Image (cartoon, rainbow, N blue to C red):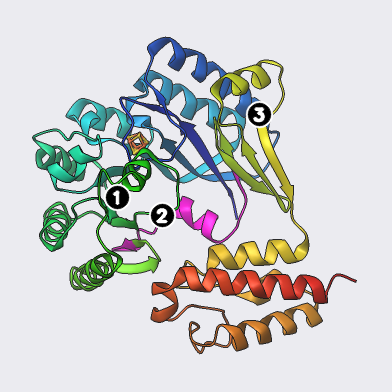
Amino acid sequence: MGLGLYVHIPFCARRCSYCDFCTVEYNGDLVGQYHDLLKMEVEMYPFSERVETVYFGGGSPSLYPVEFLRDLLSFISYSFDTDLLEATIEANPWELNLENLKQWRDIGFNRLSIGIQSSEREILERCDRPVPRNLRDRLMASRDIFQNLNLDFILGLPGENESNVAGNLEMISEVNPDHVSYYVFDSDHETKLMRLVRNDMIDLPENEIVEGLHDIILDSLSKMGFCRYEISSWEKGNCECLHNLKYWRNEKYLGFGVSAGSHFDRKRYVNTSDLLEYRYLVNLKRRPVAEMMENSVIQEVFETLFMGLRLVEGVDLSKLKLPEELNNTLVSELRVHLSDYLSPDNARIRLNDNGMDLSRSVLEKLMEIKEEIEVAFST
Ligand code: SF4
C-alpha cells in the first residue's frame, strides 16, 4: 500500500458562510510565501514509501497559480518515490475556464473535483457563495477535459427543497461525472451560517425534509447507474476516490500545509491552522504540528472502525491481526450492540442500509463499546 499525500491550499476569494475549513483570503504576496513554506515542509518528511495519490484540497487550489501547482507536483516527485495512480485538484466553478482546465491536466492532475454544493443560485447566494452565470458550460468543458470528474454537493442548506434537489440531480445527469459526493450539512460545526441560524436570522430545512430529500437522492443516483461505496460518495465505472479510500481504510497518509492531518505508525498529527504559527515553525525547520496523538492498539482499531464503517465494504478485522482474545471480544460486542445496523457478513464488519442512514447512532454505540473494551483490556 503506497502513501497518500494531501496538500492544503487555504486561499479563497471569499468565505462561504457554511464553511468550517481553514481558509484565508487570497493575497498574491502571501501565496508566494506559502508556496516556499510548503516546499520546506515537504522536505522534512524522509519517507521511502511509494506515493500513490496526491490530493490538493482547500481552500481553493484552483486559485493557486498554475506555475506553483506545477512546481509543487514536481517537487513532490523529486522528494518522494512517486508512482501516481491519482492526482486530484479541487476547483471552484469560477476558475473553470479552458486554459486552466487544460493546464491542470497537462501538469499532471488526472482527477478534478468541483465544489458545486447546489445548482440553485439563490441558495448559494444566501450562503455568501456567488456562482458564475455560465456554470453549465464550465462543467461541460470540465467533463470534456478530465477523464475522472467529481461533483460535490451539500444537502440541507437554507431554503433547500425538492425542486432544488431535482435541479442538482438534473445537473448530475447532464454533466455525467464519474463520481458524486453528496454531504449532509453538518450543523455541529461552528460557522457563520450556524451563528445566523442560532440568532433566528436564517432557517435550515427541517430534519424530516432533509431525510426525504436524501431518500430521493439515493434512489435517483442509483437509477443513474451510480454505486454508493461510502456514506456520502457514489461512483461509476470503478472511479472511487483512491485518495479518500486511504483515509477511510485508515492507511498511511501525510498532509502538508495549515490544518493538514497525517497518519502513520499509529500516530495522528494535525498541523496548526494558524498561518503565522505555521510560518514561524517551518522557518525554524520544525514540523508545524499542533496536535499529535499516539494511539494504543485499541484506539487504532476503533479509528479503523469509525472510518471503515463509512464504507459499504466495511472492515475486515482479520487484517488488523489482533490478539485472539481482543478480536473475539470485539466481534461479539459489535454483533450484540450493533445487531440492528450490521450486515450478516461473517468475514467483515459492514453496515446495512439502516446503519448507513443512522451512522451517528452507530458512532455513539461504537464509542460505548470502545470504552467497555478499554476497561476490560486495561490490565
Ligand atoms: S466552501 Fe470552499 S470556496 Fe467556500 S470558503 Fe470554504 S473552502 Fe473556500
Ligand 1 shows up in which quadrant of the image? top left
Say how many tags the image has.
3
The answer to which quarter of the image holds residue 222 is: bottom left
- Secondary structure of residue under mark 2: loop
Query: Is 250 in the magenta?
Result: yes
Q: At x 72% / y 54%, what residue is drawn? A: 266
**Does 63 sit above or below residue 223?**
above
The answer to whether the residues at label 1 and label 2 have Cβ atoms under 8 Å apart is yes
The answer to whether the residues at label 1 and label 3 have Cβ atoms under 8 Å apart is no
Q: Nearer the viewer, residue 296 or 151?
A: 296
Query: Residue 273, position in %: x, y?
Result: 55, 31
Query: Mark 2 — residue?
Result: 241
- If the image is split into quadrants, where does the N terminus sit? bottom right
Residue segment shown in magenta:
234-254
Query: Residue 91, position in %: x, y?
Result: 31, 36
| Badge 3 or badge 2: first in the primary sequence | 2
Identified by mark 1, the residue type is Asn
The answer to which quarter of the image holds residue 375 is: bottom right
Q: At x 15% / y 51%, what residue is drawn? A: 175
| Badge 1 or badge 2: first in the primary sequence | 1
Identified by mark 3, the residue type is Pro
Query: Mark 3 — residue?
Result: 288
